[in-house]
Amino acid sequence: MPDQFLQEFVSDIITRLDENTTKLKASLDELVEADIWKRPNEHSNSVGNLMLHLAGNIRQWIISSLGNEEDLRERDKEFATDSGYSKSELAAKLFSTVAEAKKIIQNISAEEILKKRKVQGRFYSGVSIIIHVTEHYSYHTGQIIFWTKLLKDKDLGFYTGVDLNEKNETR
């Protein structure tokens, strides 16, 4: 794998993780403590559940597999929890996990990114693992944004003043 490709891939992944973290922080700023554990219905998750789930997923897929740490994930608890963490505790847990994962991604070698690892009973390359985590983080970030907009009945302004037709020429 050419170094330039690996550098571009890692740079783009870090950009996407950072964009989603920024959007999550903006969403959390709109929510009060009572909003964190609200569920739209019994078949849906709260913001708190989604944040625990994201932290668990990122820890399992990046930190445990690519970072060679023990996998201690208890996935069912991520969805069963209905209290016990404040908004700031959840934010600290998730965002420190993202920061730890980013360090692993930023330091991955070409050999390690191509190596297959077993996660959730299947084998994936480092590339596949990183793509999975990035899309999974984006997917649930979108759910949290949507739920925040429903609760607060407001636009969160992510694209205010941004020309969506402008090409990114800086990279």
Image (cartoon, rainbow, N blue to C red):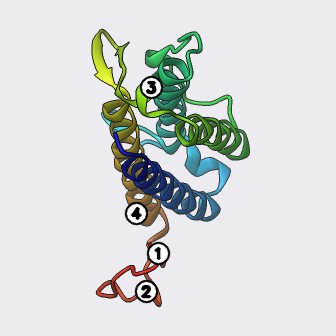
Mark in the foreground, 3 or 4: 3
> Closest to the observer: 99 or 36?
99
Q: How far apart are marks 4 and 2 (CA)?
A: 23 Å
User: Which quadrant, please, contains the C terminus?
Assistant: bottom left
Q: What residue type is labelled 4?
A: Leu
In primary-sequence order, the first of circles 3 and 4 is: 3
Q: In this view, does 47 lie above or below 167?
A: above
Q: What element carries label 2?
A: loop
In primary-sequence order, the first of circles 4 and 2 is: 4
Label 3 Cα neighbours within 10 Å, binned few <14 / some 14-19 / many ≥20:
some
Q: How far apart are marks 3 and 4 (CA)?
A: 42 Å
> Closest to the observer: 119 or 38?
119
> Closest to the observer: 4 or 170?
4
In primary-sequence order, the first of circles 3 and 1 is: 3
- Cβ atoms under marks 3 and 2 closer than 8 Å: no
Q: Is residue 1 toward the left or the right of residue 61 in the image?
A: left
Q: What residue type is labelled 2?
A: Val
In primary-sequence order, the first of circles 3 and 2 is: 3
Q: Name the residue under label 4.
A: 150
Q: How far apart are marks 3 and 2 (CA)?
A: 37 Å
Q: Mark 3 points at which residue?
A: 112
Q: What residue type is labelled 3?
A: Glu
Q: Which amino acid does label 1 sit on?
A: Phe
Q: Is residue 171 above or below residue 137?
A: below
- Cβ atoms under marks 1 and 2 closer than 8 Å: yes
